[in-house]
Image (spheres, helix red, strand yellow):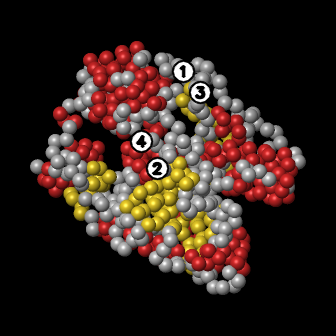
Amino acid sequence: MDEKARILQLRDELHRHNHLYYVENQPEISDKEFDDLMRELMELEARHPEMFDANSPSQRVGSDLNNDFEQVEHRYPMLSLANTYNRADVQAFYERVSNGLGGEPFDICCELKYDGLSISLTYEEGQLVRAVTRGDGVKGDDVTANVKTIRSIPLRLTGHYLPSFEIRGEILMPWSSFESLNAERARCEQPLFANPRNAASGTLKSKNSAVVAQRRLDAYFYYLLGDKLPGNSHLDNMSEARNWGFKVSDAMRRVHNVDELFEFIDYWDRERSQLPVATDGIVLKVDSLSQQQRLGYTAKTPRWAIAYKFQAERACTRLNNVIYQVGRTGAVTPVAEMEPVLLAGTMVKRASLHNQDIMEQLDLHIGDQVYVEKAGEIIPQIVGVNLDERPMLLGDRVSFIKRCPECGTPLVRYPGEAASYCPNDVDCPPQLKGRIEHFISRDAMNIDSLGPETVDEYFEKGLIHDAADLYRLRVEDLSGAWGTKIKSARKIVESIDRSRQVPFECSLYALGIRFVGKVVAKLLARHFSTLDALMQAGTEELMSVDGVGEIIAGSIRTYFSDPRNLDLVARLREAGVCFEMTSSSEPTSDLLVGQSIVISGVFEKHSRDEYKHIIEQHGGKNSSSISSKTSFILAGSNMGPAKLEKARSLGVRIVSEDEFLAMLS
């Protein structure tokens, strides 16, 4: 391929990856691979100026514009930074700055590069008036309503702030929120977010600010803009911004030479795994604003700053096999089985291949040496093949299956979906068992005496075929031929019997309606009060509920139009399952109104979930993390030492189980 043809090919490829990253929030390649392609394109374009194109990916910042939001022009353009992955480039940047300043002394401000969504906030007279995404660097989406739900972003400032200014920062999803969100999506068999950055971006672009609030986003700020700033030092200005109420990283450090700069990089390359949010590198900025102004900009990036990006930890190992897992909605997921390899501190022997398209792009063969990374440092995934190590005698090429591995039914792909599905939801065993396992789970009916192995055993014996069959089980059915398991059988039957008392929001979630997670189930239960009202609701009425869009509404309507589901609901009703809000579902007092409470430790008198319910019943709010806004910690035994230390440092009150119950009596 000649160089001109390669330029056209690279432009098409980078446009596609820009769209996947900024619009779809589903990147297929790593940042380094993207930067390598961009560097190749820019080098080829430099050799062929006659191929100039104003719309080339090299001429603009990648766009995350969303037409569902009003687009606003930035007062100051939001440019991207040049990226580097090696020390030589950092040294070269330092020398370019020195030469650009004519040998004049300068300091560098080193700061963490947070892996989130860039945001620009405008404040007037101490009030937040606008929040705009980076977009294409010239204009972005106005997401003010969503940003106002992020508790770490001040709506009103304190101290001696500027009358008018912009502040730039990064919207982030903490690891704890990311893990909870993906666990919830897994339960609903929705596609998992690859990393916290994509999760934060997808959340901030939600049309419903209530969804944004539920996902507990965070924000760190890193640059101040305005006509009359507090001083000439970038670091000092950010310290002032911290005094106004902004979350500014304590890790920012001013260094005086390149050795101190590399010390900062080395330290955070080791320690970043301890942070509560994702970071992917270090940003280096000339500290003096007047020196920044003298150094100026290229067409795309500032000359006074650069981003050094950490290498994702990667391992290479042998691909032994690819298996296919069928979930409760019929989604079929390919999973690679590999020779065990140490990656990011854990032994990994399985890795996700996500779907058919990604698997086929990799062109895998059994016996290949494959590269494995942890997406977002959590989910192992195969990112490439070491072609230099490919054996001369190739193993079989891995092709996606055409039939369900469990029941043999031909697979289907629905419009707009990347996953392949087994449509046989009547007889496919993993789907039937998966729905029962979901039904008994803690957040659903909380039948804690049963587990996947027991469900599998009862299913294979023909004792249960769906969730309603659980309520027909008798002690004698489960106690064994000679009554050897009578104690455990009684425990199981009693646990099933107790599940009749779980609140409506839990029994609704237990039905396993696609896309209806526990948060949406709670919103629906509180809005409609009874299952009958929900079943009769039209699409428009469903979409009037916070957090319910067209897809969820359509899924609910589809579920209740299926006679088999109606029969299941009728049999569950007959068994005594609660499908309406009761007086116990309503708040019983306002004793905890306005209080944010963190639960930690092991309890004797109630479970953690029961305490969460009690807190809500008395008007309080459950929180998963400790902050200066935490009212108190409800502490059982074995409270985590990190939480205890943080509580002490912030002066947060610790309340014992007995003290808490006494507060409510």
The image quarter containing residue 138 is bottom right
State the residue position of label 1.
423
| Residue 426 picture location, percent across and down | 48, 17
- The residue located at (59%, 60%) in the rendering is 77
In the image, 7: left or right of 213?
right
In the image, 421: left or right of 153?
right
- The residue located at (52%, 52%) in the rendering is 72
> Which one is earlier in the sequence, the residue at label 4 or at label 1?
4
The image quarter containing residue 531 is top left
> Which one is earlier in the sequence, the residue at label 1 or at label 2?
2
State the residue position of label 2.
143
| Residue 148 picture location, percent across and down | 39, 53
Relative height, residue 346 to residue 250 (above, below): above
Q: Which amino acid lies under the numbered mark 2 shown in the image of this protein? A: Val
State the residue position of label 4.
208
Q: Nearer the viewer, mark 3 or mark 1?
A: 3
Q: Nearer the viewer, mark 1 or mark 2?
A: 2
User: Pointer 1: residues within 10 angstroms few (<14), some, or many (20+)?
Assistant: some
Q: Which amino acid lies under the numbered mark 4 shown in the image of this protein? A: Asn
| Residue 665 picture location, percent across and down | 11, 49
> Closer to the camera, 73 or 362?
73
- The residue located at (52%, 26%) in the rendering is 330
| Residue 346 picture location, percent across and down | 55, 53
Relative height, residue 404 to residue 14 (above, below): above
Gap in Å between the C-alphas at discs 4 and 3? Answer: 25 Å
State the residue position of label 3.
415
Q: Nearer the viewer, mark 2 or mark 3?
A: 2
Q: Which amino acid lies under the numbered mark 1 shown in the image of this protein? A: Pro
Circles 2, 4 touching at the beta carbon (< 8 Å): no
Residue most extreme to the left: 665
